[in-house]
Image (tube, rainbow, N blue to C red):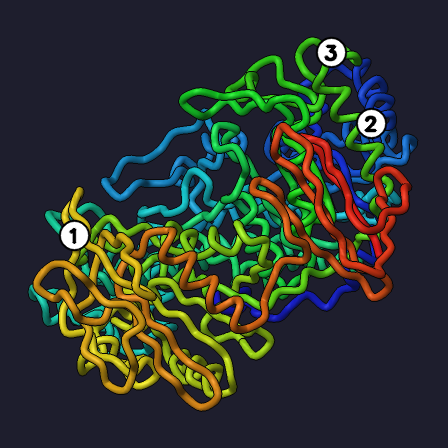
Amino acid sequence: MDQLLSTEASAIPQVSKLIPHMSYGGDYNPEQWNENIWLEDARLMKEAGVNLVSLGIFSWVKIEPRDGEYDFSWLDRVIDILHAHDIGINLATATASTPAWFVRKYPDSLPVEADGTRLSFGSRQHYCPNHKPLLAYTEKLVRTIATRYKDHPALKMWHINNEYGCHVSRCYCDNCAAAFRTWLQERYGTIEELNARWGTRFWSQQYGEWEEIQPPRKAPTFCNPGQQLDYFRFMNDSLLNLYLTEKRILREITPAVPISTNFMDFFKPLDYFRWAKEVDVATWDSYPDPREGQPVRAAMMHDLMRSLRKGQPFFLMEQVTSQVNWRDINVNKAPGVMRLWSYSAIGHGGDGILFFQWRQSRAGAEKFHGGMIPHSNDENSRIYREVKALGQELKKLNGLIGARTPAKVAIIFDWENWWAVELDSKPHNDLPYVQRVAAYYNECFKRNIAVDFVQPSDDLTAYDIVIAPMLYMVKPGEAENLEGYVSGGGTLIVSYFSGIVDENDRFYPGEFPAPLRKLLGIQVEEFDPYPQGHANTVTYRGQAYGCSLWSDVIQLEGAEAVATYTGHWYAGRPAVTSHSSGSGNAVYIGTELDADCLGALLGEMLTTKGISAPLSAPEQVEVLQRDTEQNKHLLIINYNQEEVCLDLPENEDYVNLLTGERVSGSITVSGIDVAVLQY
């Protein structure tokens, strides 16, 4: 597996230079329709401003209806029709679901759950990532497709597989067990080193031979944490190996064509920072629930996608025009909402807006999932009219392609830390990592402060403030990197339950938070997880605020108390501390502060650092900035039903790219509307 796992960034021209316009379109599944509809689809796409479609994602059995027999006649015809209408192709490798004939020939290709249940054919993603015949058939299919279409002028991007791990993120079959043992030997070298890293002297778990090791299948009680953590890493590598198998072939045959695969919303099983090194553009599928109102979580995910490749713009590869089919209640998007959410994606760094799917399916599990063309097939339907209007409008924004988002605040987000902190047998087993990250992100979002996401080993010098929520796992070199950042003048914010374990989920020797103790200037003597319904209070700047979930009992070792507890047996002890180091300072938040307190604390730090929004705006109004070498751009998105008026900086003239009007002094944005200002 190691020969395929690469960490080299793609040596390929930027996607923005290869596709120099705002991409607009969606998944197209012509195999679900008669050929007489294909020309009609192309006409409607052209009218709607569609310039890119994802094609062939679930077409393996249509392309290879029987083992070794290929039929490309239908795909040739579709691609030629789309090209004749100036529509580019994001061509899929068709490997997202294996055909029934393959499963019949290789029943051991079906994945196995932790309890030993083997899953069946009849859905999708029904494959084991370590099944060797699957790899062989995948290589043959991809090479055949790439060779056939490598010179077609409609080919703009490659779409490998689809939403890796969405339904089967971990397989526990014998194929995976054997591959896991090989992976462990490559990682640790000797069985003695593995035993030391996993702490197998506990519960008589020590191994004498590699063959004794199995995946962490269903067991009487808690599995070994080190074993679980390594299996998460192994399965991430196994799926990445599938992707890289295809990528290697595509890069060989079409070296100038960008390659990607679509990511998902805060998907825990896959380390997208690692995957992002192997794509030419980050693409992801966004499906906020309309019941949420303003899509804050989607905004956070947009920022993560932009951050995966160090600020490079991403593509929103899937969203829905109206309603999905897989929630408990599938609420529809009200008029204008689809447009607003699309502009939010653009404002956070999107260079492409695409949907699932072009035309609603007549049959199958997703027949109630919305499309750009609804079941009515009515050109005057609200859905198609909104699709058409947005597509034509986006043609005015080609000047944003490649634009970057300036950010002075970063939040550390680490997948391996996520895996480790949410393993079982913790002091508090209901502390979702993403929610802890979101608490800090939300305070920046409310203030229209741009945020990048980083890893704890990244170069942090570009940021004035770096936030590390619940950095439970600190891997080698990370503490030193954070110390260097603070010493150089940065402000670091670290939350409770940080600095606890190493990369194998073993405690660091010494008092908590051992690797960060010197930097933070504190010692955490005890944890106090709160039962449900219990809370405490803290005093900050003379005002009382609430805190919940967890409290650290802190002893100062050079730091000063910024906030103190007012309740429980540790009343009067520090709840928030600050410690100077070099030219910067490190802040520790030892409890779950309520939003008012966290907002006050973070707001004070932002002010001290001179970090502010591009424009002052009312609530429920996003103001986002994207800059090119030539121009700066402000996107103003008004989620309110009522119009809002925003003051603009003096002595600055703007052009509203959507209306062509020149603007200065102030701008009024109608309810559920958008303005895009260039200056």
**Residue marked by disc 3:** 377
N-terminal of the pair, mark 1 or mark 2, is: 2
Residue 132: x %, y % from top left: 47, 51
- Residue 322's tag is none
> Which of the two discs, 2 and 3, sits closer to the camera?
2
Circle 2 Cα neighbour tier, 10 Å, few/some/many (<14 / 14–19 / ≥20): many
Residue 288: x %, y % from top left: 52, 35
Q: Is residue 336 left or right of residue 88?
A: left
> Could you tell me how far apart the alpha carbons at marks 3 and 1 are, in whole angstroms?
55 Å
**Residue marked by disc 1:** 530
**Front-lying residue, 400 or 66:** 400
Q: Amino acid at mark 1?
A: Tyr
- Residue 48's tag is 2
> Could you tell me how far apart the alpha carbons at marks 2 and 3 are, in whole angstroms?
14 Å
Circle 3 Cα neighbour tier, 10 Å, few/some/many (<14 / 14–19 / ≥20): few
Q: Secondary structure at mark 3?
A: loop
Q: Residue at x 45, y 72 (%)?
A: 456
